[in-house]
Amino acid sequence: MSMDPLKLPFDADEMLAGLRPWIECESPTHDAAAVDRMMDLAAYDLAQMAQVERIPGRLGFGGSVRARFPHPKAGEPGVLILGHMDTVHPVGTLAKLPFRREGDICYGPGIMDMKGGNYAATEALRQLIRAGMETPLPVTVLFTPDEEVGTPSTRELIEAEAARNKYVLVPEPARDDGGAVIGRYAIARFNLMTKGRPSHAGARLSEGRSAIALMARKLLEIEAMTGEDCTFSVGVIHGGQWVNCVSSLCEGQSLSMAKTQKDLDDGVARMMALAGEENGVEFRITRGVTRPVWEPDHPGTMAMFEMAREIAAELGFELTGSSSGGGSDGNFTGAMGIPTLDSLGVRGKGLHTLTEHIEVASLPERGKLMAAMMMRLT
């Protein structure tokens, strides 16, 4: 059946109605049961079109969903749609940030990052199947549970699935100008710990050695290392239990980002060199998960980007492409050298905040973009 995928009847209102249950199923990364409930909803929607597998979670995280769509070339390298269903918003955020539409925008936890894009990709497949249009290559969808904390439990699963495929489409939210991502910076995470000596803060203050005081000094030292080549930030701190006790333990987490692997390696070395002991307080640093640099200008990725640009022009907008800070699971597939196009998802603002929202019109726009990509990739 020769039909233009850009003329398929994508409907913003219908898409929003289908997306709503996904948004109202809160799924913060660290709540495995909540993430699994979200995976159930996605599995139900995908099972109407594809062979669906539920892959159990590990390391305390939720599970994944993999859907393989029927195709004469099933099993041959095809197109992988890669998305995460975890969000940064704790359960209960809906009370402060309910699903609500105000004219051209719609609010909700995780609607931009990245349930909106995942839903647009799912709808793209639904529209193609309904119209009887067969993609040149087989399509697989993989939704994972732990991207927001650096993908500690599913990196191998993602890499194994990507290795079986020819192309990877990642419906992470679009860049501010609606653009796509063709490369991403490297990211390293660090776990920080200071161990002090407790004492009564009133009667025996001088006998104690404060873990919090050293962590505070180290935090300033770490953030002062930020430069053009490599950034450093401390995003989590927990310390102390009693105000009348000199703190014996303080823990934190830090993140570092660089445009090249060499700059990241240098940054990691500078970070690790901060460990040691000061004034009877020990400062320990251990490496957390890392995202490798996904270098831009890969020929396969650039060819995909050119195709996406042509489709966007037919849809009436100019699609830009650039390297981006902020990691995604596209880092892994891009670093493997598999042509990857990221940030094909919805337009919006306020991701990771209590104003997170999308432009409703971007749901059909991105659905059409991804449907056309799947029809043209060979």
Image (cartoon, rainbow, N blue to C red):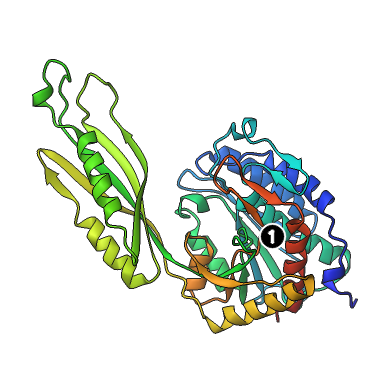
**Could you tell me residue 161's position as x and y percent?**
57, 67
The residue that appears at 82% across and 73% down in the rendered structure is 134
Residue sticking out furthest to the top: 203
Q: Residue at x 22, y 29 (%)?
A: 247
The part of the image, by quadrant, that contains residue 287 is: bottom left
The amino acid marked with disc number 1 is Ala
Crowding near the residue tagged with mark 1, few <14, some 14–19, many ≥20 C-alpha atoms within 10 Å = many
Quadrant of the frame with the C terminus: bottom right
On the image, the x and y values in percent for residue 104 come to 76, 49
State the residue in front, 88 or 350: 350
For the question of whether residue 54 can be seen, the reply is: no
Quadrant position of residue 289: bottom left
Count of all numbered marks drawn on residues in the image: 1
Whether residue 170 is visible, yes or no, is yes
Place of residue 172 in the rendered image (x, y in percent of width and height, measured from the top left):
60, 59
Quick one: quadrant of the N terminus? bottom right
Q: In the image, is 254 to the left or to the right of 171?
A: left
In this rendering, position of residue 229 left or right of residue 150: left
Provide the secondary structure element on which disc 1 rests: strand
Residue denoted by label 1? 67
Percent of width and height locating residue 77: 64, 76
On screen, 266 above or below 53?
A: below
Which of the 4 image quarters holds residue 193? top left
| Foreground pick, 247 / 229 | 229
Left or right of residue 122: residue 176: left
